[in-house]
Amino acid sequence: MRRTPATLLRVTALSVLAGALSLSFAARADDAPKPFDVKNNFRNICGFCHADYGRKAGKGPQLMNSERTDEYMFNRIKNGLPSRMAAFGSVYSDEQIHLFVKFIRALKEGEEPQNP
């Protein structure tokens, strides 16, 4: 095969196209929804009031080993309490709020919290 400028141009164009397509497919794989990171959200949003991932009292009460029901916790996270706790029902879905409750229930003293 002779390497004419037209041949080199075609080969270069095909290489660029192949690279662009592979990047496009890689971007699509990266665009897949990531699982909800409860631990990170708790640390960034709730950790301001609930110290040590809720394992200790801070501005808000300790959540680990709470005697409150799951329903109570769900409703408090979703609806808040005026002048005490913000409502997060417009920020998080019901499914995500249930994951927060599950996260809180799994808290153990001396163990690093894990996503449910």
Image (spheres, helix red, strand yellow):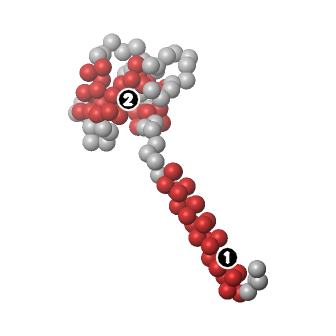
Residue 57 in view, yes or no: no
Pick the residue in front: 9 or 63.
9
Query: In percent of the image, x 65 and y 70: which residue is there?
Result: 15
**Front of the two marks 2 and 1:** 1
Point 67% across, 86% down: residue: 6
Q: Which mark is residue 31?
A: none
Residue 35 relative to residue 85: left or right:
right
- Name the residue carrying label 1: 11
Q: Neighbour class for label 1 at 10 Å: few (<14), some, many (≥20)?
A: few
**Front-lying residue, 1 or 18:** 1
Give the mark nearest the N terminus, 2 or 1: 1
**Helix, strand, or loop for circle 1?**
helix
Q: Which residue is mark 2?
A: 99
Q: Quadrant of the N terminus?
A: bottom right
Residue 104: % across, % down? 41, 23
Q: Tell me if residue 85 comes above or below residue 107 in the rendering.
A: below
Q: x, y (%) of residue 42?
A: 43, 33
Q: At 33% across and 12% down in the image, what residue appears?
A: 67
- Residue located 62% across and 76% down the image: 13
Q: Is residue 18 above or below residue 114?
A: below
Amino acid type at image mark 1 = Val
Q: Position of residue 93 (x, y in %)?
A: 30, 38
For mark 2, give the secondary structure. helix
